[in-house]
Image (cartoon, rainbow, N blue to C red):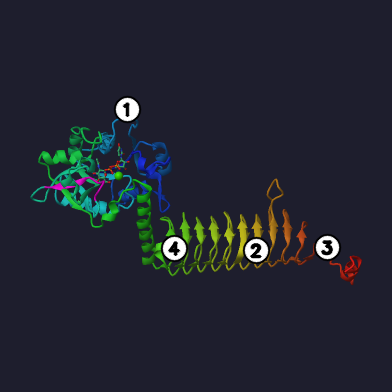
Amino acid sequence: MNISIILAAGEGTRMKSNIPKVLHNVCGKPILSYIIDASKKANIDKNYVIVGHGGDKVKEKLGEDNIIFKNQPVGKDHPYGTGYAVMQAIDHIEDNSNVIILCGDTPLITDRTVKKLITYHKENQCDGTVLTAILDNPSGYGRIVRDKNNNLLKIVEDKDATDEEKAIREINSGIYCINGKLLKYALGKIDNKNAQGEYYITDVITILKEEGRKIGAYIIDDSKEIHGVNSRVQLAFCEKIMRSRINQRHMLEGVTIIDPENTYIEDGVSIGKDSIIYPGAIITGDTVIGENCVIGQNSRIENCKIENKVEIYSSTIEESIIGDGCIIGPYAHMRPNSILGKNIRLGNFVEVKNSSLGDGTKAAHLAYIGDADIGKNVNIGCGVIFVNYDGNSKSRTLVEDDSFIGSNSNLIAPVAVRQRGYIAAGSTITDEVGEGCLSIARARQVNKDGWVDKKHHKNGK
Ligand code: UD1
Ligand code: CA
């Protein structure tokens, strides 16, 4: 049996934040959720997450789906350190299990690496195995000290290291696979007599080694995976790598991304093949985009369902559904709960909110469509406003199929336009427009011949 213990109780002081470190987002998902996902995907039977600082927030955000939280008491009267954190799950460690210890602050770790670590540990019949990495700049990390035969001798923390040890470029990733019985035994022997006054999990490795146990050191293929987040600078670093991984995944699935360095797609997004994404696009949440779509530059799309052959240019689309073949923008804004049928055209400066539009309807320029139910093949002219708010409450407008709303009209809700209703430009509609009826609701034009000359004469010009 394999169990994981994920350490996430630390304070995260260097983040300078009111939010627990492990809840900061990388590509739209909390850091800790990546580690939990990697652990679950590596076929680990039980996942224990050690929480402390901000523990309630962590539990609330991540839910308890196939994870078991353990509380580490925190505060100045309590001990501290990665070893003390692991002790919080000691009652759950079975003698013959493999315990995989993971850090809650390394979002780039993959299930592939966790699986490889377990395989290495088993194939080499190790009692404990440390996942290590070779870094150009190892400062800050614990160093792997090897003996003459190249076997792991001990792990020395940066703060406890001699100058000679500090020059070692092989570092401890903070990820281990250890036999359950031996882990429990060694946890009983560690102390906090070191530069930081902490209980170090790394001492478990040193103790087992000293007692003649077989300790392996498995060097990771891609050292980027073990980068931890301790500061906002490292958060941006991890975000950048995660972003490129996500973009690569989409490109390998048949999506064209013109400039992957400048395209921001969150982890939960799915995109169909032959869609093209232009620079500056920000696609977030649970958005699903179909095939053959074009997402133009600087568009922001959040939690939307977008069907096939949709084109969106420099527009903001939030929590909405867009049917096949719609063309939107540039500079359109779809606010939450808007539903577009097929082949709809929304042009420049059109705002839609909490409304549904039927197939083939058009609003090509400068309109506000709020709280409206609009049928098929309706033409909404330039400058039309659905007046949905009387200062107190919102009301809805109904526009039935094949209607024509002339430019610069106001539809004062609640009001209805029946099928093939036709509203003359510049009308302010307060009463129902009947089926097939023309409504003109504006003052008649008055022409006064010679009026300008008379006015000038009076003024002595
Ligand atoms: C640790 C390792 C170091 C390794 C590095 C890799 C030790 C002593 N050092 O150092 O050798 O190179 O990780 O990133 O283990 N945590 C708790 N409870 C605590 C203290 C920490 O849950 O009381 C958690 C933190 O939330 C974090 C993880 O353990 O997720 C690592 O702690 P951190 O303080 O970041 O350890 P490092 O100093 O980075
Ligand atoms: Ca760390």
How many other residues sit within 10 Å of disc 3, few (<14), some (14-19) or many (≥20)? few
In the picture as drawn, the residue positioned furthest to the left comes out as 148
State the image coordinates of residue 457 (x, y, percent, origin top left): 91, 69
The three-letter code of the residue at mark 2 reads Leu
Give above or below for 20 relative to 260. above
Separation of marks 1 and 2 at Cα, in angstroms: 63 Å
Q: Nearer the viewer, mark 4 or mark 1?
A: 1
Of 261 and 421, nearer the camera is: 261
Pointer 2 and pointer 4: residues touching (CB < 8 Å)? no
Query: Which SS class for mark 2?
Result: strand
Residue pictured at 20% horizontal, 43% vertical: 178
Q: Give the labeled residue for mark 1.
A: 77
Q: Earlier in the sequence, mark 2 or mark 4?
A: 4
Separation of marks 4 and 1 at Cα, in angstroms: 51 Å
Using the image, tell me which numbered label, if any, was put on residue 443: 3
How many other residues sit within 10 Å of disc 4, few (<14), some (14-19) or many (≥20)? many
Q: Earlier in the sequence, mark 4 or mark 3?
A: 4
In the rendered view, does 117 fall on the left or right side of 147? right
Residue 143 covered by magenta stretch: yes
The three-letter code of the residue at mark 3 reads Ala
Q: Nearer the viewer, mark 2 or mark 4?
A: 2
Residue pictured at 36% horizontal, 62% vertical: 249
Q: Give the labeled residue for mark 4.
A: 271
In the picture as drawn, the residue positioned furthest to the top comes out as 77
Please state the extent of the stretch shown in magenta in the rendering. 138-146
Q: Is mark 2 within 8 Å of ligand 1?
A: no
Q: Give the labeled residue for mark 2.
A: 366
